[in-house]
Image: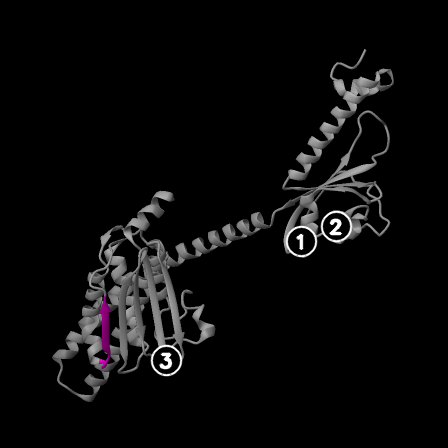
């Protein structure tokens, strides 16, 4: 009587000598179909599967494993594990004629540099035959590509570390604001007392020092304000917005400063621009930062050119200057925090611009040539396109 939980196919194979010709043909057909199904499943797996003999010679390797190791089916047939996976062989202390007999279950994470850089999680598991007492003759090696997983883990760790640093920095910056406000108030009080004194070289010298101190306090306050805007961004309040109005307001606000520096503003706006979904205050801050940057790129005189136009999908604002330009090798640093080409710049302005534009679904492009000037192009999706993007998300 067969064992209670035995496979009917095993029972049938055990009585193969008793079968007639038709039954044998049916058995062979069934075995062939099951073999085909098993091969199909193994070959479809994303994980690599390698079967090796105890001697380390590869008996079978599915397509995923061959792709990971950079071998063709022909190249991998019958070769030793130490040749296909030399790093593993070294890790297991296998020589060219090494044997796997001493290993039970082995787990490793290894780096592969060919055919491309990967990090692979690897398991070696003995294939045991419960029906026999024979010594283990084969091992299965399972390969999983964990390159993306490892990269994501590293990124999460870096993000967590950065967030911790930013939260700490934001707290310190916030606390610095109170003593700075106190300093500003007391400096004003000292200036009022000085204004009541008679003019003298000593009073003039003290007033000059006081103006320097006040200027430095204002600069520190500006740095803290921009830092907090960068590390504590608020979600944009998206409303129907015509970009021309905040653009003209920014130019008008900075007009007296530009005029006193002898800078001419050349504006060319389309008669009308399609509406976008935008936060008016944030967009106005973007325009203010870019126009201010353009002004500071020119010592005296020069031209700021502003263009506004659109196509079927997007609205474009271009702000260019005739300043000193940015070196090619420094262009990629423009959006990095604390990078600035200005002596007294805080290096957060362009980072804030890029973040605001990105949160509006847009893009920022910069073209610059040393000695010629810089052109910043802002690309905003029109309202109908932004709505589609939001719905798709």
**Label 3 secondary element:** loop
Q: Front-most of 56 and 16? A: 16
* Magenta stretch, main secondary structure class: strand
Residue depicted at x 34% and y 61%:
352
Q: Report the side of 263 relative to 371 (left or right).
A: left
Residue 147 image position (x, y, % from top left): 60, 50
> Looking at the image, is mark 3 or mark 2 earlier in the sequence?
2
Seen from this angle, which residue lies furthest front?
Answer: 22
- Residue furthest top in the image: 1
Give the residues in magenta: 261-269
Q: Mark 1 points at which residue?
A: 111
Disc nearer the start of the sequence (1/3) = 1
Q: Determine the CA span between mark 1 and mark 3.
A: 48 Å
Residue 1, numbered circle: none
Q: Do the residues labelled 2 and 1 touch (CB within 8 Å)?
A: no
The residue drawn where x is 72% and y is 51% is: 71
Write down the residue under mark 2.
88
Give the image quarter of residue 334: bottom left
Secondary structure at numbered mark 1: strand
Please indicate, yes or no, whether residue 272 appears anywhere in the rendered image. yes
């Amino acid at each position: 009587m067969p064992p209670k939980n035995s496979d009917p196919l095993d029972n049938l194979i055990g009585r193969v000598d008793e079968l007639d010709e038709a039954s044998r043909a049916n058995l062979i057909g069934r075995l062939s179909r099951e073999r085909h199904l098993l091969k199909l499943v193994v070959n479809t797996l994303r994980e690599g599967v390698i079967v090796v003999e105890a001697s380390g010679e590869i008996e079978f390797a599915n397509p995923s494993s061959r792709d990971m190791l950079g071998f063709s089916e022909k190249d991998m047939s019958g070769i030793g594990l130490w040749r296909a996976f030399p790093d593993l062989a070294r890790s297991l202390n296998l020589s060219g004629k090494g044997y796997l007999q001493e290993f039970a279950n082995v787990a490793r994470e290894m780096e592969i540099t060919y055919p491309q850089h990967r990090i692979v999680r690897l398991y070696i598991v003995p294939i045991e035959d419960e029906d026999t007492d024979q010594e283990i003759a084969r091992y299965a090696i399972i390969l999983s590509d964990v390159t993306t997983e490892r990269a994501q883990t590293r990124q999460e760790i870096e993000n967590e570390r950065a967030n911790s640093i930013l939260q700490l920095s934001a707290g310190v910056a916030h606390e610095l604001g109170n003593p700075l406000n106190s300093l500003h108030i007391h400096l004003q009080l000292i200036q009022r007392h000085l204004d009541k004194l008679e003019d003298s070289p000593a009073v003039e010298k003290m007033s000059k020092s006081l103006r320097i101190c006040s200027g430095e306090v204002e600069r520190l306050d500006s740095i803290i304000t921009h830092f907090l805007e960068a590390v504590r961004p608020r979600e944009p309040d998206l409303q129907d917005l015509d970009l021309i109005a905040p653009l003209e307001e920014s130019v008008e606000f900075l007009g007296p400063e530009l005029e006193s520096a002898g800078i001419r503003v050349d504006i060319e706006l389309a008669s009308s621009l399609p509406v976008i979904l935008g936060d008016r205050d944030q967009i106005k801050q973007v325009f203010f930062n870019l126009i201010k940057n353009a002004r500071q790129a020119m010592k005296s005189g020069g031209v700021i050119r502003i263009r506004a136009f659109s196509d079927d999908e997007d609205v474009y604002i271009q702000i260019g200057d005739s300043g000193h330009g940015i070196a090619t090798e420094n262009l990629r640093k423009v959006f990095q925090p604390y990078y600035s080409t200005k002596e007294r710049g805080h290096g957060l302005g362009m980072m804030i611009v890029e973040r605001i534009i990105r949160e509006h679904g847009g893009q920022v492009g910069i073209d610059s040539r040393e000695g010629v000037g810089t052109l910043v192009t802002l690309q905003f999706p029109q309202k109908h396109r932004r709505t589609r993007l939001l719905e798709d998300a």
